[in-house]
Amino acid sequence: GTIGRMNNTTRVLEAGVIAKYVLGNPNAPWHGGAAALTTEFIKKHPAEAKKYIAAYTRGIELIRKTPDKARPYLKGYTAIEGSLTNEVPLASYMLYNEFKASDVAYFQKFYDLFVDKGIFASRVMVDSLLYKG
């Protein structure tokens, strides 16, 4: 969408299609990615895991409070380059301790789609994937 819009080869017909059509609510939170640590890593390296979570938290705060300062990091750390760094929507990051029951329910609905479409062999319970701190 963004690249095509910038070079005038496409236009946005509708935004928020995952929330509206997959989750059933145009205002539903949708997160296109996640940061993950394995249970094994957390158990073997608790101090490092806490440092990682603290650093990730600072990154989220930077994005939320000063997105223009965060945007330059897209270049070089992602596939997003050039003027695109100023145009792409920034992800809505949410920390493990910010999820409400309704957020987990929407996340579950998204994961359930993968079972329904045969991508996952069995249901993955989202709540079990969230760090409990």
Image (tube, grey):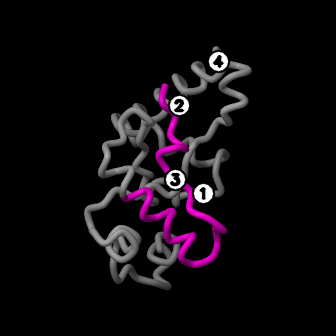
Residue assigned mark 1: 80
Label 2 is placed on what type of residue? Answer: Tyr
Give the amino acid type for the residue marked by disc 1 in the picture: Ile
Q: Earlier in the sequence, mark 1 or mark 4?
A: 4
Q: Tell me if mark 3 has few (under 14), some (14-19) or many (20+) residues whose alpha carbon lies within 10 angstroms of its own.
A: some
Q: Describe residue 74's horizontal placement relative to residue 71 as left or right.
A: right
Q: Residue at x 59, y 19 (%)?
A: 51
At label 3, the amino acid type is Met
Residue 17 percent coordinates (x, y): 37, 74
Q: How many marks?
A: 4
Q: Which mark is residue 125?
A: 3
The residue under label 2 is 56
Residue 28 found in image quarter: bottom left
Instruction: Please identify the residue farthest to the front as the structure is shown.
Output: 122
State the separation of the CA atoms marked 4 and 3.
24 Å
Q: Which residues are magenta?
A: 106-133
Label 2 – label 3 distance at C-alpha? 24 Å
Residue extending furthest top?
A: 47
